[in-house]
Image (cartoon, rainbow, N blue to C red):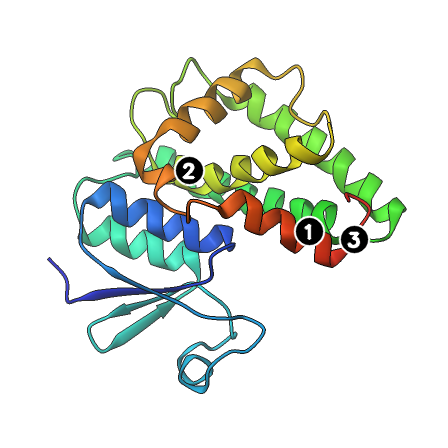
Amino acid sequence: MPNKLTLVSFDLCPYVQRAAIVLAEKGVPFARVDIDLDNKPDWFLAISPRGRVPLLRVGDDVLFESAAIVEYLDETLAPRLHPDDAVARARHRAWMDFGSAILADIWTVETTADRRAFTGARAALNEKFARVEAELGEGPWFAGAAFGLVDAVFAPVFRYFDTFDRIVDLGILDGLPKVGRWRQALAARPSVRGAVVADYGDRLERFLERRGGVLM
């Protein structure tokens, strides 16, 4: 068991959700401290090299960047969420990075006021999810029967679409049955459900309204 763990977070950040999901899957107790990213406290800026969340305090040490945080948790706490095979593990890490690329496109879709940028990001998401569909097996998880770090990365991705679907039909996940089943399985996972506040969808929708982008 490591030293006391504290997750420094922001309620809408998908990268924070990754860490919260992995912590829940490990069954380890941790404290969670939310900050206002529009008014970052000095203590946070002093320990966050990039001024971003999540941070994980491990005793007196501070880890930053979600990929490094979840890898640390997987190396130090059971059960392991990465495959034992080195090649499979490397492929999973690559798909985790692919999930981050999807989040970058989602950020454009949800915030841009430029219709051309919106259309381009939407097309990029269509292409990326088609690749995910081709990679998936019978499920229920990315690698079959075992929940892993790739699942923790993609759960916050799909959560965005729960709110998008309330606003407009983007059609991005249409015709992708394996992706759809994976999305449903992740939405029902207790660690995924518990990674955000109960009114997350409403908070996200208010954020989108304030951005005033094409999506709204």
The image shows residue 26 at horizontal and vertical percentages of: 21, 44
Decide: is 209 above or below 48.
above
Residue contact at pointers 3 and 2, CB within 8 angstroms? no
Q: Which residue is mark 1?
A: 208
Decide: is 69 above or below 191.
below
Query: Crowdedness of circle 3 by 10 Å Cα count: few (<14), some, many (20+)?
Result: some
Q: Taking 162 as reference, is 164 left or right? A: right
Point out the image quarter for the N terminus: bottom left
Q: Earlier in the sequence, mark 3 or mark 1?
A: 3
Query: Crowdedness of circle 1 by 10 Å Cα count: few (<14), some, many (20+)?
Result: some
- The secondary element bearing badge 1 is classed as helix
The image shows residue 160 at horizontal and vertical percentages of: 58, 40
Compare residues 102 and 35 and report the one nearer the observer. 35
Q: Earlier in the sequence, mark 1 or mark 2?
A: 2
Point out the image quarter for the C terminus: top right
Look at label 1 and name its amino acid.
Leu
Q: Is residue 17 in view from this perspective?
A: yes
The image shows residue 75 at horizontal and vertical percentages of: 23, 51
Look at label 2 and name its amino acid.
Val
The image shows residue 23 at horizontal and vertical percentages of: 27, 49
The circle on residue 150 is 2
The span from disc 1 to disc 2 (Cα, nearest Å) is: 27 Å
Decide: is 188 above or below 117.
above
- Residue mark closest to the camera, 3 vs 2: 3
Q: Which residue is mark 3?
A: 112
Compare residues 155 and 194 and report the one nearer the observer. 194
- The secondary element bearing badge 2 is classed as helix
- Residue mark closest to the camera, 1 vs 2: 1
The circle on residue 43 is none
Write the residue at 70% across / 47% down.
Answer: 110
Q: Taking 146 as reference, is 96 left or right? A: right
